[in-house]
Amino acid sequence: MEEYQESNNNKGIFWKVGFGALTLLSGFLGYQLSETKNVTVSQEQTINTKVAELTKVTTSLDSIGLQLEAKKAEIQAYGGKVDELEAAIAQLNEDKRKLKNVNGFSEKNFNSKIAEYKNLLSAKDMEIAKLKEENGVLTTTNQNLNTENQNLNTSIGSLKTEKQLLADSNDAVIRKNRELSEKITIAAALKAQKVIVNILKSNGKEDDGGKYKASRVDKIKVKFHLAENPVTKKESKTVFLKVLDPDGAVISDNLSGSGTFTYNGKETTFTTKKDVTYTNNDQAVDIIYGRGNAVVYRPGHYRTELYSEGFKIGEGSFDIK
């Protein structure tokens, strides 16, 4: 009976000790879990703070980058140097690249860089103002003068309109003068009248009529009159003669004085030419061309064309039987 009671007492002691140990273990695990949660919350707060700092710095650098590019473009427009801005833009891009290294990020360091960029922007504002003044550009940012600026802009717009009207008027005058000059040039062109083509036989005798036997033609003689024209200058004029065969080809022989001249902007061949001193009195002019005895004119209709100073001044024809 005593042994049974002692056994029950021992069991009670063991149960109490075990319960106490479980209570301590439960408390320890609860403490550890609480500490773990606190650490997790702290880490999350640190990450959120880091993200906010990174976002703020990134936004600032992006904004500064746009401003640097704008200052660069404006200074270039006024002819200023942009070496310092280009170096700053390159450095800013490098700073933005370094932001990817989150572990090495320091908001303090980047805030210092941002302050330097802002100082540079302020300095460039002063430089731009100086460039504007040097280039004669009058600008103002005084809000109290907005109304005056609007009036000035209106006046400038009116001046621009007036300037454009003057430019258009000047262009019109130049165009009219050019047209008048062209008309005078055309009016001053020589005019060959009464164009006839005779032939010279081998014995030197001249034959007329416009139709000739090939065997009798030694040379051709183109005769015409230069009409009176008070606009035409009295000076030496070069008259070019083109003789075209029945196929429309220009008869030419460099040994007989043939060559080329410009007509309507293109180079064309002439048969022969003659320098004539214009006297403005309906003067008669003769141009003689000989192909040589070895060449015989084949039967057909021939045309002659006369040119001078870029104009066609007359034409004639003859037939070979």
Image: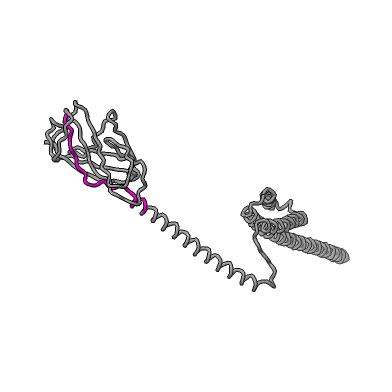
The residue depicted at 22 percent of the width and 39 percent of the height is: 222
**What residue is at 23 percent from the left and 43 percent from the top?**
224
Residue 199 belongs to the span the image colors magenta: yes
Query: Looking at the figure, which quarter contains the N terminus?
Result: bottom right
Residue 282 placement, left or right of 182: left
Question: Seen from this angle, which residue lies furthest top?
Answer: 294
Residue 208 percent across, percent down from the top left: 15, 38
Return the residue nearer the eye: 118 or 195: 195
The answer to which of 142 and 242 lies nearer the viewer is 242
Looking at the rendering, which quadrant does residue 276 occupy? top left
Depicted 294 relative to depicted 149: above or below = above
Observer able to see residue 281: yes
Q: Which residues are magenta?
A: 184-202
Q: Position of residue 113 (x, y in %)?
A: 74, 54
Q: On the picture, is 99 further left or further right than 279?
A: right
Q: Position of residue 100 (x, y in %)?
A: 67, 52
Q: How is the image coloured?
A: one colour
**In this view, 107 is above or below 298:** below
Quadrant position of the C terminus in the picture: top left
Work out whether residue 100 can be spotted.
Answer: no
- Confirm whether the magenta stretch covers residue 172: no
Residue at (22, 40) in percent of width and height: 223
- Front position in the image: 256 or 78: 256
Q: Position of residue 90 (x, y in %)?
A: 67, 49
Total marks placed: 0
The quarter of the displayed image where residue 49 is located? bottom right
Foreground residue, 16 or 46?
46
